Amino acid sequence: MKKINFWVLSLSAFIMNNSFALAQQDVAKPMQLGLREPATPQMERIAAFHDDLLMWIITVIVIFVTALLIWVAIKYNAKANPTPSKTTHNVLLEVIWTVVPVVILIVVAVPSFKLLYYLDRTEEPEMTLKVTGYQWYWGYEYQDTEGVSFLSYMIPEDEVDESKGQRRLLSTDNPVVLPIDTNIQILITAADVLHAFTVPAFGIKKDAVPGRMNETWVRIDKPGTYFGQCSEICGKDHSYMPIEIKAVTKDEFEKWLVEAKDKFAENAIPENGQQSNTLQLASYAGAQ
């Protein structure tokens, strides 16, 4: 009995620790339900809109429709009701099932418009990050800091080192580094085909369209590593262009900028999005 208790406690501790570690790294957990844990005010509002309003409406509708189906099946089956009614219209019923959905839509639409307006852009950005989607990797330009731009490729599966917090199909060779408690304007475009820049914990999902600059913004609440992926089917390697963002304090970000200027000075993104750094290209090739 003691051995059983020991193994049960050990297994529970392992699951809890593993789940905590995964949560800290913003990756999906086994058997996870619900939205990703918010890391920004944007995602907090999206989660509140979903959990506090939509879920209640959806639940009431499902219960009502289920109960109605059960009632109809019991009361109006051939055995219980051998002579069916030939009624074809009921004005009151038709008015109700027209008006009620309209009211529900209005109840959903008013707060959703407010949320969409809030998510659209920030009036006072403190920094600007330009994101460009390529087949099949991402390019980033810190537009307030000259000389800091780079391409970001997925780390090949056989090179992933989980001891360093790297995750299969999610970690990149050049993660994006952003400061917390900062209004960050994000400009999103593409160089070839349609992509979609998506980071669930930030509440961001924006199309990257060639020849067009879409805009959104983010304000990260807490340090950590956050992952995302392209959410637009963009070709054969669509699943191999992840997004990795490291949120740090403002002091740590300033120190990183100094290092980044030296690191990426010779590998700035040219017009065609192809860096001369052969290690970058070799890393990408290994993911194929």
Image (spheres, helix red, strand yellow):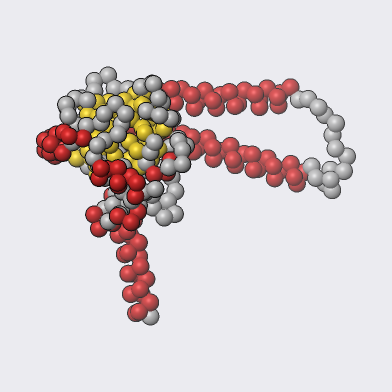
Residue 108 percent location from the top left of the image: 49, 27
The quadrant in which residue 180 appears is: top left
- Percent across and percent down for residue 142 are 22, 29
Q: Which residue occupies the foreground of this view, 264 or 41?
A: 264
| Residue 69 visible, this orientation | yes
What residue do we see at 60% from left, 42% from top? Answer: 63
Residue 26 showing in the rendered view: no
The quadrant in which the N terminus is found is: bottom left
- Asked which quadrant contains residue 276, the reply is top left
Judge whether 74 appears above or below 119 on screen. Answer: below
Give the number of marks: 0
Q: Is residue 231 left or right of residue 128?
A: right
- The structure residue drawn at horizontal position 65% and vertical position 43%, both measured from the top left corner, is 67
In the image, what residue occupies the spot 21% across and 35% down? 267
Residue sitting at 35 percent across and 67 percent down? 11
In the drawing, does residue 251 fall left or right of residue 108?
A: left
Residue 161 x %, y %: 27, 56
Q: Is residue 124 above or below residue 203?
A: above
Q: Work out whether residue 15 or residue 243 is closer to the camera in this orientation and state it.
A: 243
1 and 18: which is toward the camera: 18
